[in-house]
Image (cartoon, rainbow, N blue to C red):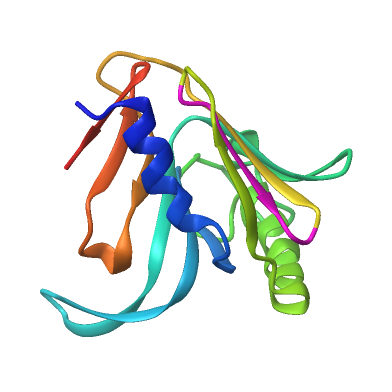
């Protein structure tokens, strides 16, 4: 088990790092931060970002009063979805994919960095970015279901996993 204080300290590593990308694997949303670092896996050598956050609960990326993209967008068909829609299906079929295109353009144009990280007593997470964007994460607290995860230092560091109102490291 990891304490709230330990989790807050670990996520402090995000401060000052650029927010570089957002995407998904099925209905798991990933966000990456920092520079590229080498990583070796079963497919060989590749470059990954230094830090990542994975989301599997309610969340939204906002700018002022505008919601740029949110968890619910994973479950709504996108503009170019042919035929039947299934959440978590092929990339490019959900409204999430449509909205992430716009966010990706903002990331390229503005190169936002993380100005502040805030974690509440229930492990709700808030990342404030230099561009005026804010990531807000709302854990569901469901038993046996991961809400969010922080992956430290290039995939080789500890993972801080938030599930059911507590955190643990792997």
Which x, y percent locates residue 30? 46, 53
Q: Which residues are magenta?
A: 123-131
Note whether 48 is above or below 159 in the view shown: below
Which x, y percent locates residue 2? 25, 30
Task: Looking at the picture, tell me which residue is in the foreground, 106 or 90.
Answer: 106
* Point 45% across, 42% down: residue: 27
Numbered disc total? 0
Which x, y percent locates residue 76? 65, 38
Q: Is residue 128 left or right of residue 16?
A: right
Can residue 18 be seen by looking at this rendering? yes
Answer whether residue 112 is magenta in the image: no
Which part of the image, by quadrant, shows the C terminus? top left
* Point 22% across, 51% down: residue: 158
Q: Is residue 50 left or right of residue 118?
A: left
**Residue at the outermost right position:** 65
Which part of the image, by quadrant, shows the N terminus? top left
Note whether 135 is above or below 56 in the view shown: below
**On the image, which quarter does residue 18 sit in?**
bottom right
Can residue 25 be seen by looking at this rendering? no
Answer whether residue 130 is magenta in the image: yes
* Point 20% across, 64% down: residue: 156
Note whether 45 is above or below 77 in the view shown: below
**On the image, which quarter does residue 100 sit in?**
bottom right
Which x, y percent locates residue 7? 36, 37
* Point 77% across, 73% down: residue: 110
Q: Is residue 147 left or right of residue 111?
A: left
Note whether 91 is above or below 38 in the view shown: above
């Amino acid at each position: 088990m990891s304490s709230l204080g330990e989790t807050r300290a670990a996520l402090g590593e995000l401060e000052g790092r650029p927010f570089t990308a957002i995407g998904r694997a099925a209905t798991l949303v990933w966000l990456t931060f920092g520079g590229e670092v080498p990583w070796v896996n079963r497919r060989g050598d590749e470059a990954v970002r230094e830090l990542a956050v994975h989301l599997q609960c309610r969340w939204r990326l906002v700018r002022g009063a505008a919601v740029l993209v949110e968890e619910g967008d994973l479950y709504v068909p996108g503009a170019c979805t042919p035929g039947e829609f299934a959440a978590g299906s092929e990339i490019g079929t959900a409204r999430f994919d449509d909205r992430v295109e716009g966010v990706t353009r903002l990331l390229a144009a503005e190169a936002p960095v993380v100005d502040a990280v805030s974690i509440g007593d229930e492990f709700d997470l808030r990342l404030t970015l230099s561009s005026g964007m804010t990531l807000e994460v709302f854990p569901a607290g469901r038993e046996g279901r991961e809400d969010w995860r922080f992956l430290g230092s290039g995939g080789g560091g500890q993972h801080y996993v938030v599930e059911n109102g507590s955190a643990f490291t792997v």
